[in-house]
Image (cartoon, rainbow, N blue to C red):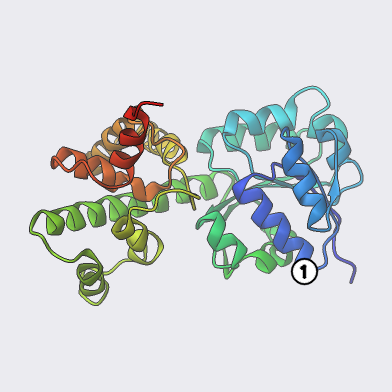
Amino acid sequence: MDKPRVGAVGVGLLGSALTGTLLQEGYEVRAYDPDPKRVREHEDRGGRGASSVRSAVEGADIVLLALPTGAIVREVCLGDDGIADSATPGTLVVDATTARPDDSIETGQALAERGIPFLDASVSGSSAMAWERDIVFLVGGDDGDVARARPMLASMARAVHHVGPPGAGARTKLIVNLALGIHRLALAEALTFGEQYGMDLGRLLDVLKDSAAYSRAMDGWGDRMVTGDHGTPRSRIRQHAKDVRLMLDEGAASGAPMLLTSTMAQVLQVAQQQGLGDADNSAVMEVLRRLAGRRKGWLGARRSRRRQPR
């Protein structure tokens, strides 16, 4: 059976990993991104470039979105020359964006009125994990639409979970990211505590991994915290800060207590004020290290270089 033709909108960190994997699996992928460099990189990987949303979507069987926010998803789907104007009825839209659940539901409903089905297929895992196909898709939508998208999703991931009706994928992603962010901050706090004792952080990380405190956050971000290498981000501080704002909004709307998430939001705000918005999420440790009065390390080194006379 022939593979469906895929149109992709958004080939940044996550989108490039997802489409790159599809190309490796033999899918035809035509991609658009507002950054021409990203489109050229997609072409270098063997994909087809597009100059607009319309040109990416026309003729596609499935459209894959990986965009910064739900508001951008809505514009791409419903704006002038967007998916609603460009796709033929029956084209399936699969959105891997971390979006506000209500935004996903509303966008999906608006597309459905044009005969275009929509899935919120949020990704659990970083872009680096996506290149290794070590991600999990959390999918909200109609049973038949999920079944149609499953072969493509399964080719990019180690698991695909249909978690409920439209909006459920976005909700589940926020819950997963809530737990992950708190695990990451807890690890940073534990390592900073150990550093204050003068302990060897590499050895301490090994102990933590072998203890009852273990979490997968230690595998993804532990070494970066120990070495202070927060460049070449797997996932960025500013992106997680956006997710946390969504969590707090959803928590307030549902009446769920968000005590630890509120603390996480404050740490991320400080990180961004210190110029760490584009750093890897492991850089939350640098906020704690500075609170502990430690000036060395990645953040301190950057600031020291800026102070040197030219």
Nearer to us in this view, 103 or 200 = 200
Mark 1, secondary structure of its residue: loop
Q: Tell whether 209 sits left or right of 130.
A: left
Residue 114, position in %: x, y? Answer: 81, 34
Q: In which quarter of the image is residue 161?
A: bottom right
Q: In which quarter of the image is residue 279?
A: top left
The answer to whether any part of residue 178 appears in the image is no
Image quadrant containing the N terminus:
bottom right
Residue 4, position in %: x, y? Answer: 85, 59
Nearer to us in this view, 273 or 124 = 273
The residue sitting at 31% across, 66% down in the picture is: 215
Farthest top residue in view: 80
Check the image and report above or below for 75 versus 41.
above
Q: Tell whether 174 sits left or right of 35.
A: left
Q: Tell whether 104 sits left or right of 247.
A: right
The residue sitting at 67% across, 38% down in the picture is: 108
Amino acid type for the residue under numbered disc 1: Glu
What residue is shown with label 1? 25
Q: Tell whether 118 sits left or right of 248.
A: right
Image quadrant containing the C terminus:
top left
